[in-house]
Structure formats: C-alpha cells, structure tokens
Amino acid sequence: MEALNGMPEQRRKIFMMSRFKGVSNAEIANRMSLSIRTVEKHISNALVYVKKALEKNYIFFIIINSTNPISSLSKPL
C-alpha cells in the first residue's frame, strides 16, 4: 500500500508489526525499546494517515469514474 511509504520509518515498522504480523503492542514496545503508550500512539497516527490516504484515493476514483463517458454505457436504460 502506497500510503505506508509516506509514513515515518518507525511508525511504518510499528504499524506493519501490529497489523500485518499480529505482534502485540507490548511485544512491539519490548522489541523497539519503547513504552506501550508510544506504540499505541504510533498505531493511532498510522491509522489516521491510512484513512486519509484511502479517502483521498476514493474521492479521486469517484471523480474520475463520474466523468468517464464509458461508465454511462454500462448503466441500464
């Protein structure tokens, strides 16, 4: 996902461990020598970042799709 590339490296690593590898917040904190609260904050910020990126891409898709003359051909009469 492109949105992950725009995150700071530490936030991206924490998010990937949490969401894609299933590592607990306590284990992430232990592995990275951080507090659990810091890990939680990184995950929270990452989720906000990903949500905004998805919303931006979704709105772009809607705009492009609505201006595409071919899309009107697939609509029932």
Image (cartoon, grey):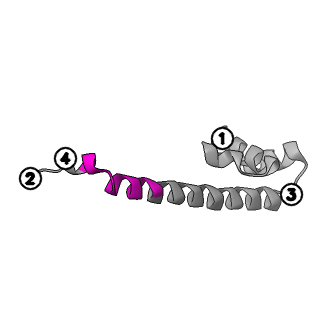
Whether pointer 3 and pointer 4 mark residues with C-beta atoms closer than 8 Å, the reply is no
Query: Nearer the N terminus, badge 2 or badge 1?
Result: 1
> Residue at the spot x=68%, y=56% of the render?
46
Measured Cα–Cα span from mark 4 to mark 1 = 44 Å
Measured Cα–Cα span from mark 3 to mark 4 = 56 Å
The relative height of residue 53 versus residue 73 in the rendered view (above or below) is below
Residue at the disc numbered 1: 22
- What residue occupies the far front of the structure in this picture? 69
In the image, 44 versus 60, the foreground residue is 60
Disc 2 is placed on an element classified as loop
| Residue 58 coordinates in the image, percent (x, y) | 46, 55
How many tags in the picture?
4
Query: Nearer the N terminus, badge 1 or badge 3?
Result: 1
**In the drawing, what numbered circle is on residue 35?**
3
Q: Is 60 left or right of 49, judged from the image as shown? A: left
Q: Is 34 left or right of 44, judged from the image as shown? A: right
Amino acid type at circle 4 is: Leu
Amino acid type at circle 2 is: Leu
**In the drawing, what numbered circle is on residue 77?**
2
Measured Cα–Cα span from mark 2 to mark 1 = 48 Å
In the image, 2 versus 73, the foreground residue is 73
The residue mark sitting in front, 3 or 4, is 4
> Residue at the spot x=62%, y=44% of the render?
2
**In the drawing, what numbered circle is on residue 73?**
4
Measured Cα–Cα span from mark 2 to mark 4 = 9 Å
Query: Nearer the N terminus, badge 3 or badge 4?
Result: 3
The stretch of residues the image draws in magenta is 60-71
Disc 1 is placed on an element classified as loop
Whether pointer 1 and pointer 3 mark residues with C-beta atoms closer than 8 Å, the reply is no
**Does residue 61 show up magenta in the picture?**
yes
